[in-house]
Amino acid sequence: MLLAIETSCDETGVALFSEEGTLVEDFLYSQVALHSPYGGIVPEIASRKQLEVLHPLVKRALEERALKPYDLKGVAVTFGPGLLGSLLVGVTYAKTLSLALKIPLIAVDHLSAHLFSIFLEREVSFPYLGLLVSGGHTALFVVQDFDSLKLIGHTRDDAAGEAFDKIAKLLGLPYPGGPVISELAEKGDPEKYPLPRPMLEEENFDFSFSGLKTAVFQLLKREGNLRNEDLCASFQKALCEVLVEKTLRAARVLGIKRIVVAGGVSANTYLRGLFQERAQEEEIFFPHPKYCTDNAAMVGFLGWIKFKKKDFASLDAEPYSRALFKKSRP
Ligand code: ATP
Ligand code: FE
Ligand code: MG
């Protein structure tokens, strides 16, 4: 049995993955309620809570299957990117287990784990275009294999999830903004307010969402009391149109027919619908909503792939806060 740990941000995830590659247990503790009053994540609170929650969660997962620590054959953990304090909790815990139990340590990259989370339910043949839309990142990758991801474009400022979160804060709605805005948007008119579609016409694979946020801010300042439902619907449509159109254009330019959308924002119902509506020859894949946001199951899957290849990490390896990928030409 393999143990998988995810502590990159404000979610504590623990999963058990069999050596045959099946997900056996999947536990998640979310701190959302703790950070919600602040309108965003408070790093110090996040890491302290990780420390408190991780060990009991691992114990519970093992107990659930009547397993002892010595039954573990490897431990996979998210090394980054994320909040360093939170990452250190999981990484230190995993290193300790690795040393004490004499089992291999497997370092999993959080962004890669998101991009392969679709494999928890089904296989997708390589190569595919991977759109990662999460709280901290918005990026396009050509995914050639489990160890070969080519970054071809990314956001120049805010991430898509961050834009949802910031608009929510602006409207006095709770954190995280994505689910709340998407719910309000269902009752609103997406054509009510004309908002910009940043970088839609540009011939590159990059994104930018801070201008959209500013446009909403100025609209609120200018017009005062607006109907939140209409504003959310208009904002969501503008943002999703850019994501969908630019991704489909990249797929067509590169001649790639399969697209995998991953990360927290890929749970968005409107985004999913718009992709299906605008796709022509392209096949679009979305993970189950519970695997879109942070979880340890996706860490377990990529951990298992690396375990089979004996791609192990040294005890000296250090967690990292920023993404490892550098942009290259497609
Ligand atoms: P990263 O993966 O970049 O390090 P993260 O781990 O914090 O960031 P995720 O957990 O993948 O990000 O996703 C969280 C983000 O997803 C939040 O910004 C949240 O608002 C957004 N989100 C969640 N559900 C939805 C939804 N239904 N619609 C839009 N956005 C959503
Ligand atoms: Fe994430
Ligand atoms: Mg999160």
Image: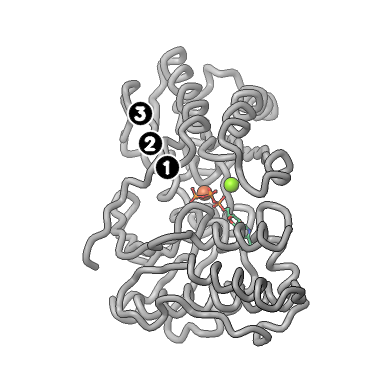
- Contact (CB < 8 A) between labels 1 and 2? yes
Q: CA distance from mark 3 to mark 2?
A: 6 Å
What is the CA distance from the residue labelled 1 to the residue labelled 2? Answer: 6 Å
Which residue sits furthest top? 100
Q: What residue is pinned by disc 3?
A: 318
Marks 2 and 3: in contact by CB < 8 Å?
A: yes
Q: Which residue is mark 2?
A: 320
Residue 269 lies, with reference to residue 74, above or below; the image says below
Q: Residue at x 52, y 79 (%)?
A: 241
Query: Disc 1 marks which residue?
Result: 81
**Three-letter amino acid code of the residue under disc 3:** Glu
Quadrant assignment, res 61:
top right
Is residue 224 shown to the viewer in this render? yes
Nearest the viewer among 123 and 163 is 163
Identify the amino acid type marked 2: Tyr
Marks 3 and 1, how far apart in space? 11 Å
